[in-house]
Amino acid sequence: MANRGLKRRTFSSALALLAGAAAVPALRAQPRLEKTRIAISVGAKGDFCNLPLTIAEQLGYFKTEGLEVEIAEFPIASRMAPAAAGAAADLFSGSYEHTIRLQSKGQKFQSIVLQGRAPAIALGIAVKALPRYRSTADLRGKKIGISATGSVGHMVANLILSRAGLKADDVSFIGFGTVAGTLTALRSGQIDAVCNADPVMTMLEQRGELRIVADTRTLKGTLEVFGGAMPGACLYGAVDFVKKNPNTVQALTNAMVHSLKWLQTAGPGDIIRTVPETYLMGDRALYLAAFNKVRESISPDGMIPDDGPRTALKALAGFDPSIRADKIELSRTYSNEFAKKAKIRFLA
């Protein structure tokens, strides 16, 4: 009996050694990262459009991939890439449409992984300022608060106005940059409507200060506003950086797709335990309510849909005369190459 036990233990040990030996080549086969320290610029870390980035950071997915990532916040999202390109930032977390804008200015940038399959922006009217609001036409001559001129909120608002026969100069757009600035402006009567991201929109809606009248936090609402699939936030960088650092970019994408997969099944408790306390704005129930509003907009696999770039270009060219659709090469504004590999690895 003792002999048989010894043989079983010896056999098990041998199997373990064989398994360990088999794992060594796999580890050695991992491609060497061209760069391990990465700086990512973001407009507002606490916005839900950047939640996948936050999860990847908080759960250590970047470290698992051998990366040391620093995330720096730039208050004015629309100016983030031009201001930091070629400077401190390697990559940017922002709206996909930024890559189109940058190309129109002669700057070659490319999305490497999609965070949101919808913009996750809502337009709401101030209940006190517009108590008799009936339709978008009632916004003529009114002031709309946005994060910044040229931001995705600005674009969404313009599209909603155009569908009601209004032009951009039929209203006044005021950029506040920060959530605090927007809240102050709304409550003091400086603006009549807000077009912005969560969690601030859900907070104002729940407190009865804002009434949502158009919503791209859902796929249905996005289709109504844009007429097709519209990519939301993504990680993007200079085409030269992507070409020079393919292994590093793949590692970053792996971490992000890992995060996206985690978010598909994460429960309320998981979310609360993972995001920084400051993101909760002192109200966990409110934060979770906002998360449920945007959950459908989160990309399941980091892939940009085939028709997404065309929808984005059409939307941009429709309200920004400086962007000529016939001069934009959409195939150079994004790549699904890295997300495809990560999707297979994580079964996303």
Image (spheres, rainbow, N blue to C red):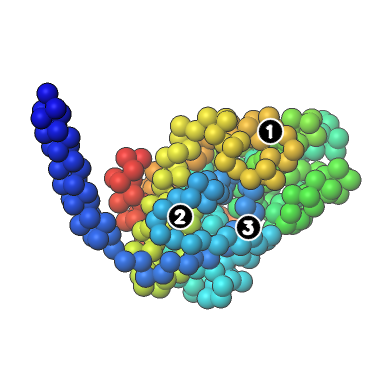
Give neighbour class at mark 2: few <14, some 14-19, many 20+ (Cα, 10 Å).
Answer: many
Kind of residue at badge 2: Phe
Residue pointed to by mark 2: 62
Element under disc 1: helix
Query: How many numbered badges does the structure rendering display?
Result: 3
Residue pointed to by mark 3: 43
- Disc nearer the start of the sequence (2/3): 3
Give the CA separation, mark 1 to mark 2.
Answer: 26 Å
Element under disc 2: helix
Pinpoint residue 36: horizontal percent, then vertical percent. Answer: 43, 66
Give the CA separation, mark 2 to mark 3.
Answer: 20 Å
Seen in the picture, residue 4 relative to 151 is either above or below; the reply is above
Pinpoint residue 172: horizontal percent, then vertical percent. Answer: 77, 54
In this view of the protein, which residue sits in the foreground, 286 or 305?
Answer: 286
- Camera-side mark, 2 or 3: 2
- Compared across the picture, whether 23 is left or right of 237 comes to left
